[in-house]
Image (cartoon, rainbow, N blue to C red):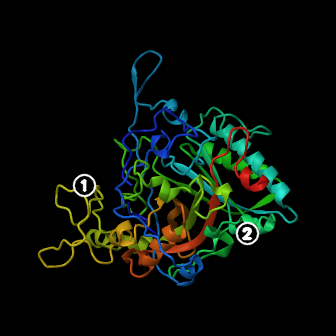
Amino acid sequence: MAELFEEGSAPTGSRGTARATQDDSRSPSSSSELRRDGDTPSSELSGGTISRRRLLGTAGATGLTLGAAGGAAGYAAASSSDSSGSSSDVTPVSSLGAGEVMFHVKHQPGITTPLQARGHLVAFDLAAGAGRKEAAALLRRWSETARRLMAGEPSAQDDTGIARDAGPSSLTVTFGFGHSFFGRTGLEKQRPDALDPLPDFSSDHLDRTRSNGDLWVQIGADDALVAFHALRAIQKDAGSAARVRWQMNGFNRSPGATAHPMTARNLMGQIDGTRNPKPTESDFDERIFVPASGGSGDPEWMANGSYAVVRRIRMLLDDWDQLSLKQQEDVIGRRKSDGAALSGGSGATETTEMDLEKTGSDGKLLVPINAHARISRPDQNGGAAMLRRPFSFHDGIDKDGIPDAGLLFVCWQTDPLRGFVTVQRKLDRGDALSKFIRHESSGLFAVPGGAAKGGYVGQGLMEG
């Protein structure tokens, strides 16, 4: 888990019924959609002269990159009153369903949006004979469908009625392009260098049929039917232009499930996302989004976009559960109860700075040398940072009676080579968590900036 657990503290407020908006001229830190906290990474990724392909050619290998998502993992529950004025224990529908995220924004929704309770990740391959023209038409359809559904409206054609009676429920739909898309559409010259294939890692057990893809769609919502409604609409819109390559379904804690907003927990029971970058940091945009001003080496159509690394990371939960509490905490480097670093005392909290040199009465480091939280820190990786925004998954029991469960890891960064790859290589070389996880699928996608009003996602690429 490239920072499966490490790092983003909880937001300071709940989503409530506020309409999440983001004007194109506003920075992420000023947007109500971008509520995500975390410790500030202590150093910048140092610039170097080593070429991308040389870096990719030097293998790396065994980390997990589970990536926690700092952000709105928990929300305060609300009470309501019935028509007679008496108090009710039922949280009003509006507290969950009325949350609306804008589609036409500077950066696509679903990147800095607080964690949602339900998610679907789905990749498509263009159909045989489909090219640039068909792909552009598909992206137009998808963008209009996403705009309508995110506003709580039905699909333009043949709406299924699955989400009838529900509000937008903070639905987001995010679109990206895989490496193979550009060859299939004759746009090879527009393919970013940042989409060069990821290197192999020693922890990889990848199923190629569930990896990569021409097009990638991320769907998130706080209501399961709203999320599924969007999934069905996107699949139907694909028509004869594209077919599903793979699909994965995930979940997070529902808003209102905790007494106050807090960082999420993953299926190992660990608080996951303590040091995630947050939009209030001065270098957040630099780390996460491609600049609109150019100079990054990315094509112009990627302005205000980001690169998403997607990994299905199986957690070996039966093996993990056999460890004692102390053994689990030593693997992570943090207390399981509250996420505080093992170097902190009784009064330490999740955000108390970790002391990497502190030892106990036996002279041993309190945070073990191979602890996940130590190895994945930005200051242990040249300042490398990424915004981790995962979903958990549970797909039943496999043929050996073992839970098929873990993390649908999604991380965002300006450059995956200097973000994900840098950290994953470090984890590969000795992360204690690696023996309890398995990377089973992988994808890398270029996610352009948000669509202009009246336009569609990827228009600059398709019509440039």
Q: Which residue is at a point 52% across and 63% down the rendered structure image?
A: 409
Which residue in the structure is indicated by mark 1? 349
Q: Which residue is at a point 79% across and 39% down the rendered structure image?
A: 158
Q: Is residue 339 left or right of 230 when viewed as pictured?
A: left
| Vertical position of residue 219 compared to residue 183: above or below | above
Q: Is residue 84 left or right of 148 when viewed as pictured?
A: left
Between circles 2 and 1, the one closer to the viewer is: 2
Q: Give the mark nearer the N terminus: 2 vs 1.
A: 2
Tell me the SS state at disc 1.
Answer: loop
Q: Which residue is at a point 66% across and 68% down the rendered structure image?
A: 212
Does residue 61 appear anywhere in the picture? yes
Q: CA distance from mark 2 to mark 1?
A: 45 Å
| Picture coordinates of residue 368, whole percent (x, y) | 27, 75
Tell me the SS state at disc 2.
Answer: helix
Q: Outermost residue toward the top?
A: 84
| Vertical position of residue 117 compared to residue 83: above or below | below
Which residue in the structure is indicated by mark 2? 180
Residue type for callout 2: Ser
Does residue 403 appear anywhere in the picture? no
Task: Sort mark 1 into few (<14), some (14-19) or many (20+) by Cα contacts within 10 Å.
Answer: some
Query: Which residue occupies the foreground of this view, 317 or 32?
Result: 32
Count every numbered label the image shows and give the total: 2
Q: Is residue 87 left or right of 238 when viewed as pictured?
A: left
